[in-house]
Amino acid sequence: MRLPDEQLRAGHIPADLYRQLPPGTDARHIVIVQQAPRSYTGPIVLTLAVTAGSVVVLLVIAFVTQIVAASIVSVLSATGGISYTLNRTAKRKKTPPALGK
């Protein structure tokens, strides 16, 4: 038994704890409660949840912004407030005259 935890599991009371007992206490009826070791599962899961939640919020904001912008453009183009035309008439280049003729 090298570690204090092993002593406590075996039912032995270390000397520093034994000195803290009030006089007349029966050492056979003492229960020593230890603090549980720290678990890192909770903080890790919380960090992952916050990260995933923020990514979802950003994606929703981007999607809603895209829908709002598309609807604004469609309403403005339907009411004549905005128009976009493509001019597809291209000027034809004159072919250079033949050199030998």
Image (cartoon, grey):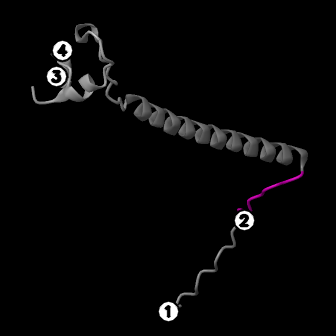
2 or 4: tag closer to the N-terminus: 4
Residue 91 covered by magenta stretch: no
Q: Cβ–Cβ below 8 Å for labels 1 and 4? A: no
Q: Position of residue 42 (x, y in %)?
A: 42, 29
1 or 2: tag closer to the N-terminus: 2
| Label 2 element class | loop
Query: Which numbered disc covers residue 100?
Result: 1
Q: Is residue 35 placed above or below 73 in the rendered structure?
A: above
Q: Amino acid at mark 2?
A: Thr
The residue where tag 2 is placed is: 89
| Label 1 element class | loop
| Label 4 element class | loop
Front residue (pair 31, 95): 31
Mark 4 Cα shell of 10 Å, populated few (<14), some (14-19), many (≥20): few
The magenta stretch spans which residues? 81-89
Query: Which numbered disc covers residue 7?
Result: 3
- Spatial CA span between label 2 and label 3: 94 Å
Instruction: Locate residue 3: give its quadrant.
Output: top left
- Spatial CA span between label 2 and label 4: 97 Å
Q: Amino acid at mark 4?
A: Gly
Which of discs 2 and 4 lies nearer the camera? The answer is 4
The residue where tag 4 is placed is: 11
- Spatial CA span between label 1 and label 3: 112 Å
Front residue (pair 64, 33): 33
Mark 2 Cα shell of 10 Å, populated few (<14), some (14-19), many (≥20): few
Q: Residue furthest left?
A: 1
